[in-house]
Amino acid sequence: MIPSRLPTIPRSQEIIDRAFRQSNRIQDFYKKDYLEKDKIKSIQKIQVIEAVARATLKRIVQGYPQNTDLTGFERNLAYLLFDFESYERTLRRLKWTMVKISELATEYIRKIKSANEVDKVDSLRKSFYGRFSSYIEDLEEYLDSLREIRLKLREIPYIDEKLPVVVIAGFPNVGKSMLISRITNLKPEIASYPFTTKRINLGILESEFGKIQVLDVPGILNRKKRNVIEKKALIAIEKVANLVIFVIDPTETCGYPVEEQEKLLTEIKGIGKKVIEVENKSDILKRDNHRLKISALTGEGIDQLVKLVGDEINDGKNKGNSGI
């Protein structure tokens, strides 16, 4: 599972500045032997710098999911959205740097303890500062990459595997986002241009059978080669849907012929999930066929659709088929 709060990713210079800033807060103290005093203070500074940097990197590493932490749905979306092997290499590099910084601190503390001159202590301390900074600076490209991946991970919605999932699918601009705003607590962006919905949005439908998760997914075109946005929708249907509401726009004001929409419907049915077929925009056109007629704009047919969804989900529960 992807954590609800992913750690922010600082720049390498921020890590360095934070570590040195903390080390400068070490209070001065009196000791008659200046060499011994310099040793103690230098060691304390190194220990603080190492601890601050290690804690920062550890927070990042532990705050981001490993492959085994992800559900099948999350894993498929992650593989689609970014280079997962590169992501794993980045986390390994952060772990490696944590180890190297700890080894470096241990090495310089040992050398400082055996130094017999103040100048030698100061030289060793400054040498540690330089090498430490180099290790952290070398992380910049990895931190940049992780910063971008963080945005992608935040696109993946959390799906509660204990609750049923309904996916609203269809061509772009058929009214999917307006429909989910009617039946759930979600208020997605609604616009009149194709692919307004670029990510998977999650809303909750409160039914007489309990809570139902409803996903508003990007529009899908009837074509063999699909883009990343369309593939997100197909992953949601294949991996988590108990039920699909397939929305058709019979008015073709969406910009796509009904024949093309129906070909996509046939493909979606072939995935093997239960499908409720609805024709939207009934306030403009109602055709004489078996499909449920609704208007996401006016609310016509919405109550009937919600009841049908509840009946289908409850029927699936009774049969012991969770679909998750």
Image: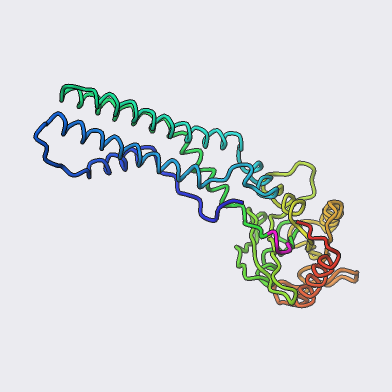
Q: Residue at x 69, y 50 (%)?
A: 73
Q: Is residue 34 left or right of residue 167?
A: left
Q: 184 or 67: nearer the eye?
A: 67
**Spot occupied by residue 232 in the image (x, y as percentages of width and height):** 69, 49
Q: Residue at x 79, y 57 (%)?
A: 323
Count of numbered badges drawn on the protein: 0
Q: 235 or 253: nearer the eye?
A: 235
Q: Residue at x 66, y 58 (%)?
A: 159
Q: 295 or 163: nearer the eye?
A: 163
Which quadrant of the figure contains the C terminus?
Answer: bottom right
**Spot occupied by residue 53 in the image (x, y as percentages of width and height):** 37, 39
Is residue 163 one of those drawn in magenta? yes
**Spot occupied by residue 87 in the image (x, y as percentages of width and height):** 56, 37
Q: Residue at x 43, y 40 (%)?
A: 57
Instruction: Answer above or below: position of 164 versus 36.
Output: below
Which residue is farthest right?
289
Is residue 268 one of those drawn in magenta? no
**Spot occupied by residue 180 in the image (x, y as percentages of width and height):** 68, 67
Q: 62 or 250: nearer the eye?
A: 62
Q: Is residue 84 left or right of residue 9?
A: right
Colour scheme shown: rainbow
Instruction: Answer above or below: position of 40 versus 56.
Output: above
Q: Quadrant of residue 183?
A: bottom right
Magenta region = 161-165
- Magenta stretch: helix, strand or loop mostly: loop
